[in-house]
Image: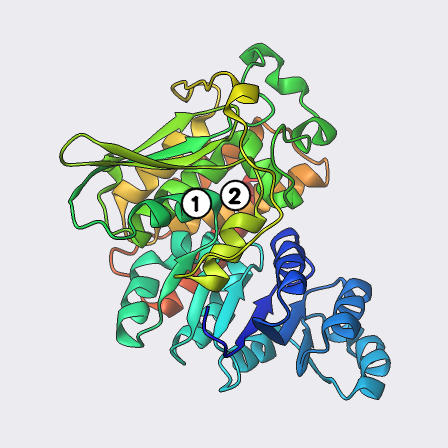
Amino acid sequence: MEQTKRRIAILGSTGSIGQQALEVIEKHRDLFEIELLTANNNSSLLIEQAKKFLPNNVVICNHDLYQEVQKELNPLFIKVFAGLESAGDLAGGDNVDIVLSSIVGFSGLAPTIKAMKKGKVIALANKETLVAAGSIISNLSREYNSPIIPVDSEHSAIFQCLQGEKASIEKLLLTASGGPFRELDICKFKDITKADALKHPNWNMGNKVTIDSSTMMNKGLEVIEAAWLFNIPIDKIEVIVHPESIIHSMVQFSDGSVKAQLSYPDMRIPIQYALTYPHRINLNSKRLDFYELGQLNFYKPDTNKFPALSIAYDSFKRGGNTTCAMNGANEIAVDLFLKEKIKLTQIPIIIEKTLEKFTFISNPTLEDIYNTDKEAKQIAKQVIKN
C-alpha cells in the first residue's frame, strides 16, 4: 500500500463490524489513523476505544450520555460531540478519507449521505441504506464521485470476483448459511425463542442482523443491495443455501464460467479489503484446509419456511418506496421479537400487512424516504396492536 496513512471514520464503532474493524486497524497502525468514532448508547465501550485509538473526534448519539463521555475524554484533548447529525457532519470532514458505515438499521442512512456529498469513500456495512434509498444513493455516488465499497461478506465476494473482469455478468449467486433453522420442521417454528434465534451456526453478528438471518430477511436485504451495488436486474440474482459459509458468493459470466471467493467465516477479511482496496495486506485469519472441509453443500432456499426472502424480491419488483416500507416494518418487528413481545413467525406477517397499507410513491425523494420509514413503522406498530 501507499505510505500515506488512510484516515478512517467509523460510524457505529461499538457494534460488531466496528469492533472488528478496530481489530484490523490495530494490527496495521502504520497504515491507518482513526479520525472519528461514533456510538449510539454504548458510552463505556466508546470511551475505551477512544482512549486506545485517540481519534480527533468522538460522537455519542444519545445526548443524555454526552457529559459522561466528555468528562472521560476531555483530558486527552479528544473533541466530543452528541447526536446523529454531528456524526454525519464530522464523517464528511476534510480529515477523513474512508467512512465505514456500520450503524445498524435505517438510522445509518443520514450520516452516510452527508459523507457521500463530501465525496468520501464509503465502506458500506449498513445494507439498509441501499434497501431504503437505493436509487437515491446510486445517484449520489455518481454525482459526488463517492465510491461505495461493500463490506458485507457476500457483496465483498462479488466485488472481489469482478476485479479485472470485462465480461458481462450472466448471474450473481448469493450464498446463504440458511441460519439456525434451516433443518427445523416448519411446524416447530411457532416455538422458536429469542435465545434460539440468536444462535447463528457460523457468524458472530449483532442481534438485529442475527435475527434477520434466522428469518432469511437478511438475505432478502442483501439481494436488494446487490441489485443496486452491481446495477443488475434482480431476476439475475439467485440465492443458494450453503451451510458451511465457505463460498461467500459467486459470479457467473456470459461464457458460463463461475468465479467464487472462499474463506472460513471471518468478517475481518471483507472489512480489511474495503479499507485497503485495491491492495491486499496480511491478516491472521484461519487458512482454508480443503482436506479438512471434505465437501461443500448447496440447496435451494425454502420460501415456505422463510417467506421474508420472497417478500424482499416482490418488494423490489414493485419499486418506488416499497423496499423502504418493508425495511421499516421489519425493523419494528425484529425489535419486538428481541423484546419477546411477538413470535418469530409473526415477523413476515407484520411486514406483509404493512405493505398492504403504506402510501406507495413511484419516484420517491429523500424526504419521501424518511416519511415512508416513519409511516411504515407506525403501521407496523398498529398491526401488532390489532
Residue drawn at (66%, 43%), measured in percent from left and top?
Answer: 207
Question: In this view of the protein, can residue 220 be seen by the observer?
Answer: yes
Image position of 196 with respect to 36: above or below: above
Image position of 78 with respect to 296: above or below: below
Residue drawn at (67%, 71%), measured in percent from left and top?
Answer: 61
Q: Position of residue 104 (x, y in %)?
A: 58, 55
Say which quarter of the image contains residue 259: top left
Question: In this view of the protein, can residue 386 be seen by the observer?
Answer: no
How many residues crowd around disc 2 within 10 Å: few (fewer than 14), some, or many (20 or more)? many
What's under tag 2, amino acid-wise?
A: Asn
Q: Position of residue 33 (x, y in %)?
A: 61, 75
Q: Which residue is mark 1?
A: 326
Left or right of residue 168: residue 88: right
Q: Which mark is residue 330?
A: 2
Image position of 3 with respect to 311: above or below: below
Q: Secondary structure at mark 2?
A: helix
Q: Position of residue 41 (x, y in %)?
A: 74, 63
